[in-house]
Amino acid sequence: MKTIHVSVVTPDGPVYDSEVEMVSAKAQSGELGILHGHIPMVAPLQIGAVRLKKGSSSDEVVAVSGGFLEVRPDKVTILAQAAETSDMIDVSRAEEAKNRAETRLQSKQDDVDFKRAELALKRALNRIEVTKQKM
Ligand code: ATP
């Protein structure tokens, strides 16, 4: 089976770079599964897990905080403001971020930016979920 090269890049530098069999990602339009030879495209991503299938070895998972996915026939590039492999994730930091966001969302104060708190909650839940999916 032909492989496809995946790079996950953030403002802090590259987070992941490898040849894989399949890339699964949550685009805003829905779940995408990308194999070698896929038609070129660009798609905005949701905050979610990107799954990398590597043949016989176990899958890898990257927590991606939105951004864009660019597909060329032999390469996938994911550009995101933040992305972490499961071993990079500090679970207690994500739990704290989750609690802070939940407290903000529950408060009735007018000065709370609910959209921002909602996104922070999604990022925290995604990070927690990715650490649980390490296979
Ligand atoms: P926090 O409130 O804990 O900073 P956040 O969702 O606001 O969380 P981001 O703005 O998405 O954080 O990310 C800022 C930087 O910190 C990025 O480089 C991101 O990879 C890193 N980061 C955020 N949360 C974690 C975590 N739980 N473990 C490891 N790195 C993290």
Image: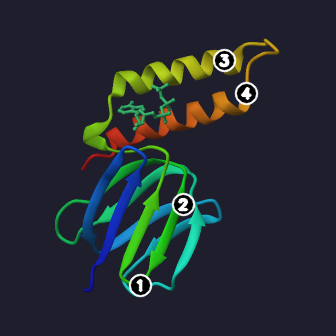
The secondary structure type at the circle numbered 4 is helix
Query: What residue is disc 4 on?
Result: 114
Q: CA distance from mark 4 to mark 1?
A: 39 Å
The secondary structure type at the circle numbered 1 is loop
Q: Quadrant of ligand 1?
A: top left
The secondary structure type at the circle numbered 2 is strand
Side of 13 relative to 100 (left or right): left
Q: CA distance from mark 4 to mark 2?
A: 24 Å
Asked if 65 appears above or below 94 in the picture, the reply is below
Is label 4 in contact with label 3 (beta carbons under 8 Å)?
yes
Is label 2 in contact with label 3 (beta carbons under 8 Å)?
no
Q: Nearer the viewer, residue 118 or 79?
A: 79
Query: What residue is disc 3 on?
Result: 104
Side of 54 relative to 48 (left or right): left
Q: Nearer the viewer, residue 84 or 31?
A: 84
Marking on residue 68? 2
* Residue 56, image x, y percentages: 17, 69
Marking on residue 73? 1
* Residue 36, image x, y percentages: 36, 83
Q: CA distance from mark 4 to mark 3?
A: 7 Å
The secondary structure type at the circle numbered 3 is helix
Q: Comparing marks 3 and 1, which lies closer to the viewer?
A: 1
